[in-house]
Amino acid sequence: MAITTALSNAFKLELLKGNHDFDNDTFRVALIKENPTGTYNAATVAYTELGSDQASGTGYTSTFDTVSTGAEAAIATGFPQIPAGSTTAVMDFDDAIFASVTVQADGCILYNPNADSAANVIAVFDFGGTVSATAGDFTIQFPAPGASTSILRLA
């Protein structure tokens, strides 16, 4: 079907409710398989919506729990912050790495398995085509932090 890069509408509401703790929660990335049957966009609410559209492959785990699901998207040191000369709060994550996998994916979701709600998807990302790794590392490289580039920003 379709993957559209977007911040989850549910995340925006859950953020205002205090259901995401950027100081203590562990954030994760799950891969969306090549040619998914579902649609993933701003309306995507929960990690569990991936179902059979979560990528599978050698060394890639799709077990949903707070310890081993997907790759950790660790918050980069010194974030969140408001960069000098800006009024925009920004968030940066370290690159998420799926180590030693063989897998193909068309996109991914960033989610919070520790959220106080089933609405745990933060954002959906379309890779613009199928990306793969063969017996190697599959890396999700988050953009450089900045008022117009950070993965999460509040202006």
Image (cartoon, rainbow, N blue to C red):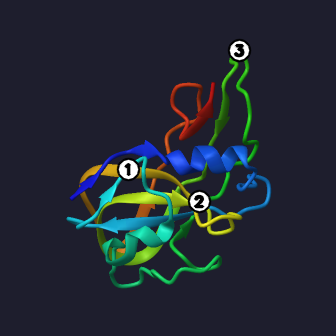
> Residue 113 falls in which quadrant of the image?
bottom right
Residue in the picture at 73% in, 28% down: 82
- Residue 42 in percent (x, y) is at 43, 47
When the figure is inspected, residue 9 is found, relative to residue 32, above or below; the finding is above
Number of other residues with Cα within 10 Å of mark 3, as a class: few under 14, some 14 to 19, many 20 or more:
few
Mark 3 lies on residue: 85
Residue in the picture at 73% in, 49% down: 17
Q: Kindly identify the amino acid type of the residue bearing the numbered disc 3.
A: Gly
Mark 1 lies on residue: 41
Q: Gap between marks 3 and 2, in whole Å?
A: 27 Å
| Lower sequence index among marks 3 and 1 | 1
Q: Kindly identify the amino acid type of the residue bearing the numbered disc 1.
A: Asn
Contact (Cβ within 8 Å) of mark 2 with mark 1 = no
> Residue 56 falls in which quadrant of the image?
bottom left
Number of other residues with Cα within 10 Å of mark 2, as a class: few under 14, some 14 to 19, many 20 or more:
many
Mark 2 lies on residue: 73
Number of other residues with Cα within 10 Å of mark 1, as a class: few under 14, some 14 to 19, many 20 or more:
some
| Lower sequence index among marks 3 and 2 | 2
Is residue 6 among what the camera can see? yes
Q: Look at the numbered disc 1 and give the secondary structure of its residue.
A: loop
